[in-house]
Amino acid sequence: GAKSLGRNNYQVYANNVDATQQQQTELKARLRHAVRNDELRVFYQPQVEASSEDIVGMEALVRWEHPELGMISPAFFIPLAEASGLIVPIGEWVLRTACAQAKAWESRYGLGLRLGVNLSAVQLMQSNLASVVATVLRDTGLDPHQLELEVTESISVKTVPHLVETLDALHAMGCRIAIDDFGTGAASLDYLRRLPADRIKIDQSFVRNIGVDPDDEAIVRATIEMAHHLKRGVVAEGVEIEQHLQFLRLNGCDELQGYLFCRPLPTPAFDKLLAERERLVNEGRAVPA
Ligand code: C2E
Ligand code: MG
Ligand code: MG
Ligand code: MG
């Protein structure tokens, strides 16, 4: 069942970092150093099929392993990276690292797992983004259909010039496009109408309220139904408890991601998870059960 992917706790965040302006400036310099000094890590969180709970993909999530502060959350340093422009090399590094890793897992285990990679608005403003992605795919050998680029809904079609054209170009290359944090932005429906989105990721703020807030439950149900009418897939983020799973499954959500199944894992732990799955399959046991 839901516990089969393990409940590891690798996320030890320096959550109490409450930086002043002065500290922000220092941290930006530190982040620049971190990129050069190889302190960034890519973790991978499984996505499972709702019906079978079998793994069908993973999301690449970056962390900063600070020598003194420990693992720093992207929620903290991505905004710094965006403000300083460092997100461009960081984003490309994450993409390349994750695509190479996904290709290695594909060679080792097959499975055709989908790889989700988050794109920042700043990356989407670069006119060469599509060619950067094409180069990374060519260099790593990953099938473009296995790559899903996640675009958060807070990115505005107004502030990012050529957003639609850039995503169209990526889509034409075979990459999948997912709308991340769906429902939290001001332009959910406009986004859905204008972007070549294959999938919607329902934001965890809605999922969290399943069993708590009937309005949010109604939004989740309606989002799944609407997505399916539009022939889009739906992933729910932040699935933490059995009740979330039951509700989402009952309402036809396609895929699930959340701590109930697995936390984001460092590469060796994720590899172990895939090896264990393969062992169960070879023994003829149901997966993941
Ligand atoms: P996101 O893309 O919406 O990623 C999902 C976040 O939810 C991740 O947080 C993940 O660890 C967390 N999560 C997954 N399951 C659960 C759950 O059951 N409960 C709860 N409470 N949280 C869960 P994380 O890794 O801290 O990343 C935060 C955000 O930072 C991401 O949100 C994304 O917007 C950004 N981010 C992470 N990696 C990258 C990256 O490589 N590039 C860019 N541009 N942004 C990134
Ligand atoms: Mg995401
Ligand atoms: Mg999200
Ligand atoms: Mg988010």
Image (cartoon, rainbow, N blue to C red):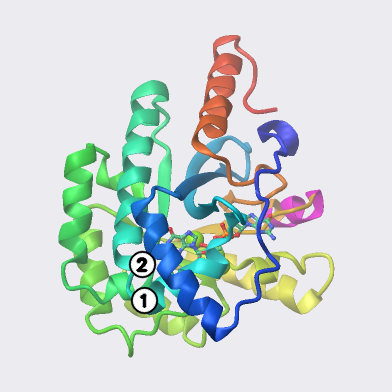
Any atom of ligand 1 within 8 Å of the CB at mark 2?
A: yes
* In the foreground, 252 or 140: 140
| Magenta-drawn stretch, dominant element (helix, strand or loop) | helix
Residue pointed to by mark 1:
84
Identity of the residue drawn at 37% across and 64% down: 32
Residue 187 falls within the magenta-colored stretch: no
Classify 244 as above or below 169. above
Which amino acid type corresponds to the residue marked 1 in the rendered image? Ser
In this view, 198 is above or below 113:
below
| Classed neighbour count for the residue bearing mark 1: other residues with Cα under 10 Å, few (<14), some (14–19), many (≥20) | some
The reply to whether the magenta stretch includes residue 246 is yes
Q: Amino acid at mark 2?
A: Ile
The spot of residue 209 in percent (x, y) is 77, 69
- Residue at the limit of the structure toward the top, as seen here: 283
Magenta stretch, residue numbers:
242-248
Q: Quadrant of ligand 4?
A: bottom right
Which of labels 2 and 1 is toward the front?
Answer: 1
- Which numbered circle lies on residue 87? 2
Q: Quadrant of residue 206?
A: bottom right
Residue 225 seen anywhere in this rendered image of the structure: no
Q: Residue at (38%, 50%) from the top-left corner?
A: 37
Q: How many angstroms separate mark 2 from mark 1 (CA)?
A: 8 Å
Give the x, y percent position of residue 105.
40, 29
State left or right for residue 142 relative to residue 183: left
Residue 70 appears anywhere in the view? yes
Quarter placement of the N terminus: top right
Quarter that holds the C terminus: top right
Query: Percent position (x, y) of residue 2?
Result: 73, 39
Q: Please report contact status of discs 2 and 1: CB closer than 8 Å, yes or no.
A: yes
* SS of the residue under disc 1: helix
